[in-house]
Amino acid sequence: MPTLSYKYRIEPNRTQSAALADMLADFCRLYNAGLEQRIDAYRRRRVSVTYNMQAGELKATRCAAPELTRWSYSAEQQVLRRLDKTFKAFFTRKRGFPRFRAVARYHAAEFRVGDGLTIRKTGRLGFVGVPGDIKVRWHRPLPSKPTSAILTRQGGKWYVVFHVETLVVERASTQSVGIDLGLTSLVALSNGETVERPRWTKRAAKELRRRQRAVARCKRGSKTRKKRVAALARHHGGIANRRCDHLHKVSRDLINRFGRIAIEDLNVLGLARGMLAKHVADASWAQLTAMLEYKAASAGVELVRVDPRGTSQTCPECGIVAAKTLAERLHRCECGCSLDRDVAAAKIVHFRAFGFAPGTGQGSLSRAAA
């Protein structure tokens, strides 16, 4: 069964909010202490400290640092697991050595539901060490009992993310579609439909510049600067929320309409380092792809990734490869094919994934497409 994340806004009072902030600060110090132990052990004795070694010392650490005893023991184990995952990721990709975290930038903690975090019968949440129960905005019901949860702080607001196992629902549609991700059109479909990119960053650029200037004019370390930084963070959060809402609607519409979806296997990280980095980041192809993946898994939809090389240079009718610049937005071929460039690429994506042209069924093409 696929595991999905359900995110809810929580509304702690002033005392509870201060307690949650203290908890994250203590978890951050525990994380940094564990990182320092690993670094010193390897430098001095060439010993690689593991999670099991640090988890075995956690009780002694709580005795040496009484402030840690206020919080859930299992949640502190998750902090050490988080550090262990960071090290394993470093040795896997050979870059990005784990760094010490600032308390102001440590915004999340993981819990096991029923151990450290409890869902009350009243619908409120209880955290070990936090006085009283915290109100939750249950904007949608949980499909089943959650196994774990993440407490997170974003833009001065508190959220809880529950991890829930869901049943796979059989797809209702048997139609297939190829998708081309672009910058002019966010999504172009092999059936000729396109979804315009909203350009959220460009829309908010004027207000963003105003808030950035307000921050720059403040003295570092002052209370006014902290207020201006918080206002800037809220503005960024609003942009991200609008972008995320739009991507959710686009991905849900595609999952509801099609039973087989083909997308390009793009190197988004590499594209985000090029000359179009700002536009690639604003389009959020990786986020849209991730949404399609988990929604397809829960809906029983087949999602296929294909090689993106040459999709925009190949004619979907005759298969001839003709180079085009980025400025050429219309595909024209000697065979008479004239299509929107992104739609033509989506047709090639569809053929590479399923072996037949969209709308022709699962038979062979009368004219080969590359």
Image (spheres, rainbow, N blue to C red):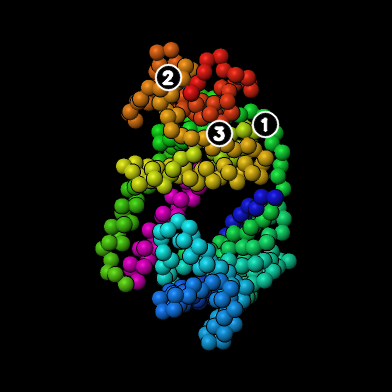
Label drawn at residue 173? 1
Secondary structure beneath label 2? loop
Q: Magenta region: which residues?
A: 223-248
The kind of residue tagged 3 is Ala
Compared with 341, 92 (above or below) is below
Give the residue drawn at x 40%, y 36%. Answer: 183
The kind of residue tagged 1 is Ser
Give the residue drawn at x 61%, y 67%. Answer: 111
Compared with 120, 370 (above or below) is above
Q: Which x, y percent locates residue 223?
A: 35, 71
Mark with earlier residue (1, 2) = 1
Label drawn at residue 320? 2
Circle nearer the viewer, 3 or 2: 2
Secondary structure beneath label 1? loop
The Cα atoms of the two marked residues, 1 and 2, are separated by 32 Å
**Residue 134 painted magenta:** no
Q: Which x, y percent locates residue 210?
A: 31, 54
Please name the predominant secondary structure of the magenta segment in the image: helix
Task: Give the quadrant of residue 280.
Answer: top left
Q: Is residue 54 left or right of residue 318?
A: right
Circle nearer the viewer, 3 or 1: 3
Q: Sort mark 1 into few (<14), some (14-19) or many (20+) by Cα contacts within 10 Å.
A: few
Q: Which residue is mark 3?
A: 262
The kind of residue tagged 2 is Ile
Give the residue drawn at x 61%, y 76%. Answer: 73
